[in-house]
Image: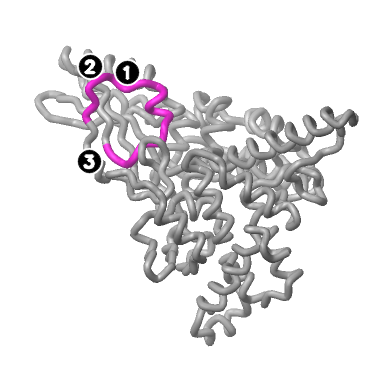
Amino acid sequence: MAQGQTQRTAKALTAALVRSALVPGKYHDGGGLGLYLRVERNGARFWVQRLTIHGKRCELGLGSPPRTSLASARDCATENKQMARLGGDPLAAKQVTQEAVLTFADAVERYLDTKLAEFRNDKHRKQWRATLDTYAVPKIGTKPVGAIAMRDVLRVLEPIWTNKTETASRLRGRIEAVLSWATVAGHREGDNPARWKGNLSEMLSKPSKVAKSGNHPALAISDLPRWWRDLKVRDGMAAPALQFLTMTVARSGEVRGMIWAEVDLDAALWVVPAERMKMGREHRVPLNAAAVALLRALPRMEGSPYVFFAARGGMLSDMTVSAVMRRMQEAEVKRLDMADTAAGREVSAEPRGYIDARSKRPAVPHGLRSTFRAWAAEHGVDRDLAEMALAHTVGSEVERAYRRTDLIERRRAMLESWGQLLQGKWL
């Protein structure tokens, strides 16, 4: 389905469909309520109802999933239609209600409507909404924004402050920003209960004191060939996505958001636009022979621009790719346990499988970039080449201003050697 196209379904929407990956467009629910789900290019989703009010055709926003479920959207749409049929104005009633009592969930929506355009990439936008929707809205979403106090913010933060410290710290800042907007907009008064200094700092431990190491668990270089062989026999679209991520040492979001228009197979080149890069700069990625072969063998879905597409044509989720590595780890541990049992040995209680040598935690996709960096350092690869491959900033601002090349061909040779390592041919 082309982007922006309306998707008319023969049957009503289902909760499972609403949760699934959907390409941008409009998905009608049927039933005569004028209800449909709008999916934006950046992945944002909104319930919208088309309704005739006093002879004029209008559109009413009914919230966003998952905070507003399909059942809730239908109930609201039914009430609106009944009100309009009796001569009322549901749009005006909604506006009056919002102005009278602005809930935290409403404040989040209105703040994001204003501020989302300022965020530099889609990943940042989605993270902002996701953390608020996951942790804050379920606990304080229905509370009037003017009544939110420190105890309410603590109720959100305390359950995750020690085990998800980085997420909790970012969440605190986002709650503070929403409440700051609400104060300036005249919906609340007084101090901001989510402020850190001289406020929450007295109630919660410093993030630096409780946060676990921020390093992503990395695969040992010696385990790479065996892990690579296991990966290549995995089914599903997430497995080749993880293969491509490994060969290019790109970030998960860059690979999952990759579209065919960014790729030149004949030139063996992938150009990631600036808006999809963490550093906000265009990044050229040379493709080794194996990466080109992988892309040429991939199926394509009509109407989906994505190279590695989800079941319904949308972008793969980060969890889908991570799940491949998790299942590989589980299978490897099971294999080792069975081997011990078959040999009459006691099954080891120590962490093993595809784990990080230092933290003893199972390796994750982002950790593969650390594995590459370690390999590059141990084998004398030029530091700037390795850092450029990882899309890191190299050199001072002056040095970058005078550099006229991104060393694409030297990086191509480096990634060919990295590909040989994956095949077990260069250890």
Q: Nearer the viewer, mark 1 or mark 3?
A: 3
Between discs 2 and 3, the one toward the N terminus: 3
Label 3 crowd bin: few (<14), some (14–19), many (20+), radius 10 Å: few
- Asked which secondary structure carries label 2, the reply is loop
Nearest the camera: 300 or 271? 300
The amino acid marked with disc number 1 is Arg
> Residue 5, percent across and down?
22, 41
> Residue 57, percent across and down?
14, 30
Q: Decide whether the magenta segment is chiefly helix, strand or loop.
A: loop
Q: In which quadrant is the C terminus drawn?
A: bottom right
- Asked which secondary structure carries label 1, the reply is helix
The amino acid marked with disc number 3 is Gln
- Tell me, yes or no, if residue 254 can be seen here: yes
- Tell me, yes or no, if residue 199 can be seen here: no
> Residue 388, percent across and down?
58, 71
Residue at which label 2 appears: 31
Q: Which residues are magenta?
A: 8-25
